[in-house]
Each structure stands twice: as C-alpha cells, then as structure tokens.
Image: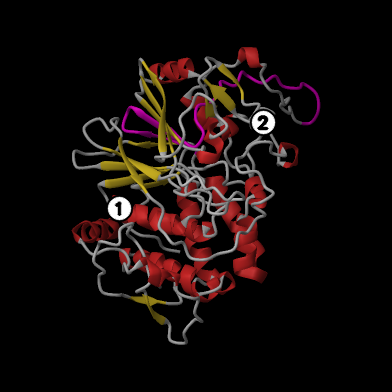
Amino acid sequence: MSCNSDTERAAAASASQSSSSPLLTSQDHQSAASPAAEVAEPPVFDSSSSIVTNSEDNPSPPSTELEIPIGWPPDGKLSLNWIRNLMSVFDWASRNIEPTQLPDVFPVEVFDSLVLCASKILHKEPNCVAIDNLGSESTVVVVGDLHGQLHDLLFLLHDAGFPSENRFFVFNGDYVDRGAWGLESFLILLAWKVFFPRSVYLLRGNHESKYCTSVYGFEKEVLTKYSDRGKHVYRKCLGCFEGLPLASIVGKHVYTAHGGIFRHMPATPKRSKGKKNRKIAFSPEPSSLSIGSFEELNKARRSVLDPPWEGSNLIPGDVLWSDPSMTPGLSPNKERGIGLLWGPDCTDNFLKKFQLKLIIRSHEGPDAREKRPGLGGMDEGYTIDHIVESGKLITLFSAPDYPQFQGTEERYRNKGAYIVLGPPNFDNPVFHSFEAITPRPKANAFYNFEEVIDSDEELDLASMVTSP
C-alpha cells in the first residue's frame, strides 16, 4: 500500500491554503431537518442540505456533487479533494440514510485501507510526540473531546481552517462514544492524519478503549453500521486506538494530554525463580506518589486495550484518566478509581520541572464539572483551572451541547471550544468558543443513556483488561 509523499502533500497544502471555498454547502437550517431519503441509484449526490456554519446569516454557496460510494485511490495516496468528499459524504449520509447503509457509501475495503495506512503511522510515533517543526507563520490548533458529534467537528475544521503545512492540529482524544457518529468522526481524523502526518496529531483519550466503547455506545454503533462485518471493523478500531500517542509537547513550553500529568514509577522488584523473571505487580503507596519524568512516559506501554488501574504500567492510565483539583498534593483519583488527582502545587511543580508554561488537557465536560466543587463549569468550552507562578492549567472541551443524548429534560447547552497557539513561543492560548450546530440530524443512541451515568465515574474497573 502506498501513502502520500511529502512532495504531494506539500502541493496539496498549497492548494488548501489558497482555496477560499468552504468545505460543504450551507443552507437554511430547516432544510437539514428534512425526512431521510433512500440512497439514489446514481453514485452522485447533491450536498445542498449540508451545514458547516453556525450562522444563518452567511450566504449559501453553490451545491457540490459527491462521489459515492467512496473508493480508495488506485495509487493509495489521499488528496485534499478525497478528504473533502469524505467529510461531505459523511455529513450527507447522517441526514439522508439509515446507519445500516453506511457500508453502501463507505465500503469496508476502504475502511481497511484507511485504518491500515493510519495505524502504520501512529504506531511509529512515541508516547509523547514533539511538535517542534514550527515556523514564524505556523499556528497550532488544540482540540478537546469530540464524542461523535460529527457536525460540530465539521464546523470546527471549517472555522479553524483545514490542516496544512503551517496549520497544525493536536486532538486530545475522546473521538468516540455517546454521540451517534463516532466512527465517521474518527475516520475523518485518520484521513487527515494520513494526508498530513507531520501536521495532525491524534492523542488517545480514555474512551479510546475496549471498556468505555462497550459501555458508552461506540461498539454498538460499529456493529449496527457494519452488521456482519461489524466485529471486524470494531477490532480494527481497537487496534488503531492502541497506536494513538498519549501526549504532546507543542513548541517548547506546552504539554497536552487527555487527562493530565502522571506519576513516577519506582523500580519494580523481580522474582528470582521460575523460567522468567516476572515482574511483581504493585501500586505505589499514596504517600510515595511523585511526578514522573518524560523518559518514564515514553517507556510506558501504551498498546493495551484498557490502561491498567493497578500493576506496574500505571502511567497510561494516569495520562488518560487523571483530573485536577483545588486541593494541594498528588493522590489517587478515588472518584474515578483510576489515575490521579493533582492540586495547583503539582501543576506548578510539573511546569517548573520541565520548563513548561502551559498544560492543556480535556476529559471533563459539563456533566463531570457539575460534580467538581471549586472548579469552573464548562459553559464556554474551557476553564482555566490553575494559575500558578510557572504558568496555567487549562481544561478544553470541544463538544458543544453535550451530551448528544441526555436523560434529563434540562440540557447543559454548553459551548465547545478550541485553542489556537501562535508564534513566537506558542504558549499564549487564544480561545475560540462556538455553539452546537442545530438542529442535529435525528438519530438513535447506541447506548442506554437514561441508565448509564453521565460522567465516567463509578466505573466497573474490575471488568477492564488489566494485563500488566
């Protein structure tokens, strides 16, 4: 299989930056709520019911034709037009066909090719990716939780501008679960990763795991959409999740991760008997907890379906599940049962220790923040949780009007947000909040949202895979 060369990507990047035409067409919001239609026989469709803007004041550009079903390029090299068509087709499909018809527009063979190509790139990246090829014209867009809210993702990409050689993207994970279009959202980001592997960075969230996807809907979503091939597609997604890096360093002064900071893991004693010196699984006592090093982070084993909550490989769980607190110190995260809680003093120590100025993490939406006294709500899509001598800690959440399916009549109606970091130091965050795209296409939930708790607390961690 062939993937894109740097020369071809550079040419496409130039075309992307010079193009002023929007991704999709924008029509009156009412037209987007039209009843679902059957898939037409000719493999070309009109995308006039698509939405990419949050304002009805913007004029509607001419409709564009879509190429359906989507095929894998004969030479195996993605183009900007291919990705634009992919986004438009997924948007169109969400409004006009049943979920079970997705294979008619995105065949499993194309899925296999995309995931294979992306996985080859992702598995070669370190646990903590360094985004340091930044210039005077570069910007870095940091994105928080998306949770399968396809139309808000499409708006965000249109609003922030597509990835390019000078416009970098760092996604902090949680692409799937809860929302109805987790698969489509994840595939769009994989396509951008394949096209711009050095400009797009996809980090892992706690929901990119076997356990969470079995509880919060992604597994059922995939099985529903691909029916008899659903198990195959789901397994491929899990394998891809295992390859997602855990964290990033932007420039020299910004650390991003889904959950947050991580612990130091003391040297593990070994057994002296037996065919192999097997490591003894243990968890450091809370009193001995201290901040870990980036060397330890990069040595941690991320290729696990579910990050362990006990044993000797705790760093992935810390990075994906930890939360900030207003209480000083570093302690086990008893509310979630995995990861850490850390106070402002730990933020200051972490920043100072690694000569950083900013931590951008995600992981907490309006439902979680409702239960966190002392920390700000998620009304604007972000909060500044710690302001310390060495810098700041920010929580960023990019899924507006979350969750898509809510068991209570009163919705949170939060905004989503993304952050833009610019030269020269890329450590001064500019916040961009946005409302949800409305109305959302009608869809059914893929999990029992009325019974499953809103936030990721009180999890049945004993059922998680805990191989050390």
Instruction: Give the answer, above or below, for where 245 lies relative to 16.
Output: above
| Quadrant (top left, top right, bottom left, bottom right) of the N terminus | bottom left
Q: How crowded is mark 2: few (under 14 residues within 10 Å), some or many (20 or more)?
A: some
Dot 2: element: loop
Disc nearer the start of the sequence (1/2)? 1
Gap in angstroms between the C-alphas marked 1 and 2: 37 Å
| Residue situated in front as seen by the camera: 141 or 216 | 216
Q: What stretch is highlighted in magenta?
A: 246-275
Examine the image and state in which quarter residue 354 appears: top left
Examine the image and state in which quarter residue 306 appears: top right
Image coords of residue 28 (percent x, y)? 33, 68
Image coords of residue 309 (percent x, y)? 67, 32
Image coords of residue 277 (percent x, y)? 73, 27
Instruction: Give the answer, above or below, for where 249 lies relative to 179.
Output: above
| Residue situated in front as seen by the camera: 311 or 443 | 443
In the rendered structure, which amino acid carries the disc numbered 1?
Asp
Horizontal side of residue 356 vs 276, given as left or right = left
Residue with the mark numbered 2: 337
The residue under the point 47% across, 49% down is 401
Q: Main secondary structure of the magenta part?
A: loop
Horizontal side of residue 62 vs 415, given as left or right = left
| Quadrant (top left, top right, bottom left, bottom right) of the C terminus | top right
Dot 1: element: helix
Residue with the mark numbered 1: 159
Horizontal side of residue 253 vs 265, given as left or right = left
Mark 1 and mark 2 in contact? Answer it, CB < 8 Å: no
Instruction: Give the answer, above or below, for where 33 lies relative to 296.
Output: below
Image coords of residue 310 (percent x, y)? 69, 29
The reply to whether residue 195 is in sight is: no
Instruction: Give the answer, above or below, for where 392 lies relative to 67.
Output: above
Q: Is residue 97 magenta?
A: no
